[in-house]
Amino acid sequence: MTDNKETDIPEGFKLSQRRKQKNVDKEMFEWDATDKDRLTYQHYMIREFFHGNFNAPIEDALEQGIKVIDVGCSTGIWAMEMAQDFPSSTFIAANIVDEPLAKDLPGNCTFLRLNILEGLPFPDATFDYTFQRMMVAMYTPTEWLRVVSEMIRITKPGGYVEMIETDGVVQRPPQDFLKWNKAWETLTWSRGIDIYIVKKLHTLLEGSLSSVKNECISWPIGWYDRAGAMVGQYAKLYQLSIKPYMASLMGMTDDEYEQWAAQGTQKLRLQRSWINGYVAFGKKPKVYEYR
């Protein structure tokens, strides 16, 4: 049965009204269930929901040529794709451990192994656009403050800082996903992580940046459209990737957990469940006092 995406939209479900950027209808990534492929698949999923690779109003500047950094770049796919789309700009993809997906990076893209929690080795006001996404499970609340402060520090006056996140909590969950939500909260809290900080990303920016914008966009899990189908597939991959932690918290053996994850997408689709994605960005004032 085909879902009619125009009907039966659950209360609280929010769609993005942003216009589609250029070059977003590229061929879909052919993936298998390795971790790097999961992260690359995640990239295309996010791009689909936000109608492009960025939300801040920087397209003209990118065309003319600016300096950009992706903090916590994972496989580096975002920076590589942006470098190809905007050859006049230069990009740095920075991450603590992962190597970039491709060895042959575009000439205007550089990969650096860096840890933002130790400070970034760049002078104040180095980049025109500082970008970060999907780091919710990496920082404690105190570390978030340090990270955002460092991102703002390296951004030029007049430049933009942008963050994209999700808390990973299933909205309108089937009954057995109540257990998932609880286990996910328990796992993250045990590591000092507050997943709900992503709901107030904009408040981390408002004290230092101007023209701060934020948006919550619902990501349907397995329904609504192609993007929803992508979330359904990604949800299964992600659930399996954290099986070593979640199975015991949910009172399951590994085999039971794998069976649960295999059946989960269908249950989520029928329930019309979703997770929420959050984006926040702001502009660094032309006159900025460094703290």
Image: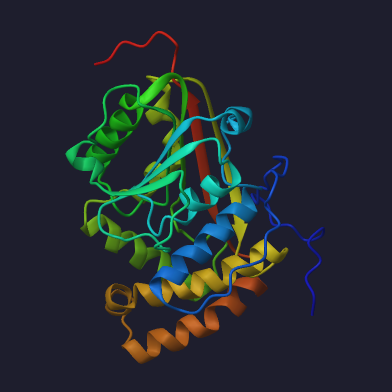
Task: Tell me if residue 265 comes above or below residue 169 in the rendering.
Answer: below
Q: 14 or 27: which is nearer to us?
A: 27
Residue under the point 29% across and 39% down? 144
Percent x, y of residue 185: 34, 59
Who is closer to the viewer here, 219 or 251? 219
Please state the horizontal and vertical placement of residue 152, each as a whole percent of the image.
35, 27
Q: Is residue 81 left or right of residue 23?
A: left
Quadrant including the C terminus: top left
Q: Residue at x 37, y 47 (%)?
A: 110
The residue shown at (44%, 36%) is 68
Does 215 sit left or right of 40 as displayed?
right
Which quadrant of the figure has residue 259?
Answer: bottom left
Looking at this rendering, what residue extends furthest in the left direction?
Answer: 118
The residue at the far top in this view is: 287
Residue 102 rendering spot, x and y as whole percentages = 43, 63
Camera-nearest residue between 113 and 253:
113
Furthest residue toward front: 107
Colouring method of the image: rainbow
The residue at the point 36 percent across, 64 percent down is 184
Say which quarter of the image contains residue 201: top left
254 displayed left or right of 106? left
Where is residue 126, by image quadrant? top left
Q: Nearer the viewer, residue 225 or 47?
A: 47
Relative to 44, say whether 176 is above or below: below
Coordinates of residue 249 in the picture (x, y in percent): 29, 74
